[in-house]
Image (cartoon, rainbow, N blue to C red):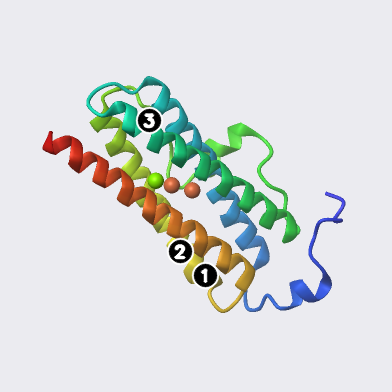
């Protein structure tokens, strides 16, 4: 890192009572989660079978796109904070909070349940980041709050789909 993308001196000064290295570490762990979530959604959408699977595929692909976008937001902030984003896919497994559940059972209900579990873990992760940055780093706070809102919507969307399928 040559530092040209790091925010200005004063921008850094307004971050108070926060260990920036610890924050960078937690943002990198969230980055690992986002890549694994992206792939879990994306590969799930390719193999899924069963009732309403075409509607579910649309939702899974939309969520995959959101997780990919979240990964980009996290990397941008990590770099601005002067950190180095995870550079190797092998680090995703080492740093993840939420892990990865391979969609080995292709049935739509099973895939939905796995992804709901992932979203619940993501909500916990971002809730903690919101609490950590609140009143201390407003830029990171706004970003993790925005991501938290998306994860809450993701969980809700998947739960509604699962309920609809169960009513068939
Ligand atoms: Fe996400
Ligand atoms: Fe999500
Ligand atoms: Mg959705």
- The yes-or-no answer for disc 2 within 8 Å of ligand 1 is no
Residue count near mark 2 (Cα–Cα under 10 Å), binned few <14, some 14–19, many ≥20? some
Q: Tell me the element at label 1.
A: helix
Q: Is residue 70 above or below residue 100?
A: below
Q: Is mark 3 within 8 Å of ligand 3?
A: no
User: For mark 2, what is the residue?
Assistant: 128
Mark 3 Cα-neighbour bin, 10 Å: few <14, some 14–19, many ≥20: many
2 or 3: mark nearer the eye: 3
Where residue 132 is drawn, which disc sits there?
A: 1
Residue displayed at 19% across by 35% down:
165
Query: Number of marks in the image?
Result: 3
Answer with left or right where residue 140 lies relative to residue 51: right
Q: Are marks 3 and 1 in contact (CB under 8 Å)?
A: no
Image check: 12 left or right of 40?
A: right
Q: Tell me what residue is drawn at x 43 percent, y 63 percent.
A: 127
Query: How far across and down, in percent of the image, does residue 87 sit?
Result: 69, 38
Q: Is residue 53 above or below residue 2?
A: above
x and y, in percent, of residue 7 in the image = 79, 65
For the residues marked 2 and 3, what is the alpha-carbon distance in whole angstroms? 30 Å
Q: What residue sits right under mark 3 in the picture? A: 57
Q: Position of residue 125 (x, y in %)?
A: 45, 56
Residue 60's mark?
none
Kindly report which numbered mark, 3 or 1, lies closer to the viewer in this rendering.
Answer: 3
For marks 3 and 1, give the CA distance.
35 Å
What kind of element bears circle 2?
helix
């Amino acid at each position: 890192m040559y530092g040209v993308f790091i925010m200005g001196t004063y921008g850094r000064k307004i971050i108070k009572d926060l260990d920036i290295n610890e924050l960078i570490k937690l943002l990198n762990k969230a980055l690992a989660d986002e890549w694994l979530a992206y792939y879990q959604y994306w590969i799930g959408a390719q193999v899924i079978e069963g009732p309403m699977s075409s509607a579910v595929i649309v939702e899974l692909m939309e969520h995959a796109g959101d997780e990919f976008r979240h990964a980009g937001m996290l990397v941008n902030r990590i770099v601005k904070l002067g950190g180095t984003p995870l550079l190797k896919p092998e680090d995703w497994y080492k740093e993840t909070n939420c892990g990865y559940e391979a969609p080995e059972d292709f049935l739509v209900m099973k895939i939905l349940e796995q992804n709901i579990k992932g979203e619940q873990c993501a909500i916990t992760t971002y809730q903690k980041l919101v609490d950590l940055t609140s009143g201390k780093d407003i830029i990171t706070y706004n970003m993790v709050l925005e991501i938290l809102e998306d994860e809450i919507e993701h969980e809700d969307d998947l739960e509604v789909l699962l309920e609809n399928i169960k009513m068939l």
